[in-house]
Image (cartoon, coloured by chain):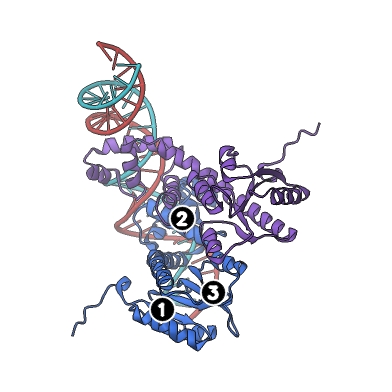
Chain colours: A blue, B purple, C cyan, D red
Amino acid sequence: MAKGQLRMSSEVPLIHIVDDDETVRSAVGRMMRAAGYQVSLHESANQLLDSLPAPSRGCILLDVRMPGINGPQLQELLDKKGFSLPIIFLTGHGDIPTSVHAIKAGAEDFLSKPASKEILLEAVERALRHYDKTHERNIRLSEYRECYNALTPRERQVFAIVVRGRLNKQIAYELGTSERTIKSHRHNIMQKFKVKSLAELVSIAEHLGRVTEPGSH
Amino acid sequence: MAKGQLRMSSEVPLIHIVDDDETVRSAVGRMMRAAGYQVSLHESANQLLDSLPAPSRGCILLDVRMPGINGPQLQELLDKKGFSLPIIFLTGHGDIPTSVHAIKAGAEDFLSKPASKEILLEAVERALRHYDKTHERNIRLSEYRECYNALTPRERQVFAIVVRGRLNKQIAYELGTSERTIKSHRHNIMQKFKVKSLAELVSIAEHLGRVTEPGSH
DNA sequence: TACAATATTGTCCCAAAGGGCAATCGTCCT
DNA sequence: AGGACGATTGCCCTTTGGGACAATATTGTA
């Protein structure tokens, strides 16, 4: 009866556990369920990749050493696919270089097995907080990219110059066309991005820039 | 005679070495000098803090365990001071949690002693590349902050609203004053930031925002 | 070939921003 | 008391931007 839907960020988080050791999977799975989380078990990286879940609120508990694709490799693959759930590494025989690399690559944490219930749950909570913090931003960002992709080549040129604060007449000169034309493009750009002010457009450009340009770290 | 000055980014980098163990200091120092770097030795975190060098191109090779202020603590202090040279940790008895924490806090690398010459030099080169990548940005950022600090309280209020794309009349209404007044503030703001267009102002605000707001990682 | 998308430009009008000149008012410090 | 600084406001004029209405040219594709 109670069909009242909770807000996205209040839904029961889904914890993905990827580990080739059945003992670990079920033990960690139990721990997570006991803490009130939903759990999805995978015995290999490929199994997770095959059933790529819609990235709902949650995180991934990922073993480092596994047959086939290992943890860090999976991390890289998911990153390339733009699939961004926080990753917490769990490892039995971790070394410092591996942990350093994983964190640099954006992992949320890097824990040694066996990890105490407290440490594990704390890490998961941190990961969920991180998810909440970045989720909205990621949504917006992909929306912006969509809008940008809807621009025509000419509009992109104008866009790039507009957001640097040039006057219409200056842009017209740079592109070898008339001021009136720039006005027209500008109008279309504003419509496609669904904004009403230059300020909003510049803000979007800054966010897009950070993604388009190299060196986010 | 050859008074030809090299560009900033081409000057001989300065490597700061902070380690309480004299043996390590001199060994690493020799290694760095042999590689053509300038070296500055410090036997404690406090000694570095006292002689806070102008942050020229270089990096810090930092021991984790030291009497007094230890490595990670120094890292945090320098960060708070806004002193940003890339930090490479060197440790004899490092553990994974410490390395994870250091990297999350922005360390460039975390190496175990003794580190081979190759590994150390590679890390230093990476750190210098990182320095080059972020240096320009940091300079600009601190300039922006200076400008912002020069704003009066009222101007800051106006600034915050202007860069969200509001019209002068809207801002006037929000602040319970007249449009003409906002124009005046706006004029002063543009002058203090030395910009000629709203777009530039918004861009600056975005950069400042990322610093002012919590959660840069 | 005809339609659709893109790029271009014109005219007219109004709203908004920028800037000059000048003045008032309150607070804080010397 | 006088001065510095910040906040406020008015008037006036110019430059820009935004939008309506309308039209032409080019190009790729159905």
What amino acid type is highlighted by mark number 1?
Ile
What is the secondary structure assignment of the residue under circle 2? helix
Q: Is residue B214 left or right of residue B116?
A: left
Q: Chain of mark 1?
A: A
Q: Mark 2 or mark 3: which is in front? A: 3
Q: Are marks 1 and 3 on the same chain?
A: yes
Residue A206 has which mark?
2
Q: Residue at x 23, y 38 (%)?
A: B177
Seen as rendered, the residue at the extreme right is B1
Q: Mark 1 or mark 2: which is in front? A: 1
Q: Callout 3: few (<14), some (14-19), or many (20+) C-alpha neighbours within 10 Å?
A: many
Location of residue A144 (image quadrant): bottom left
Q: Are marks 1 and 3 in contact (CB under 8 Å)?
A: no
Residue at which label 3 appears: A75
Q: Mark 1 or mark 3: which is in front? A: 1
- N-terminal-most mark, 1 or 2: 1
- N-terminal-most mark, 1 or 3: 1
Location of residue B155 (image quadrant): top left
Q: Chain of mark 2?
A: A
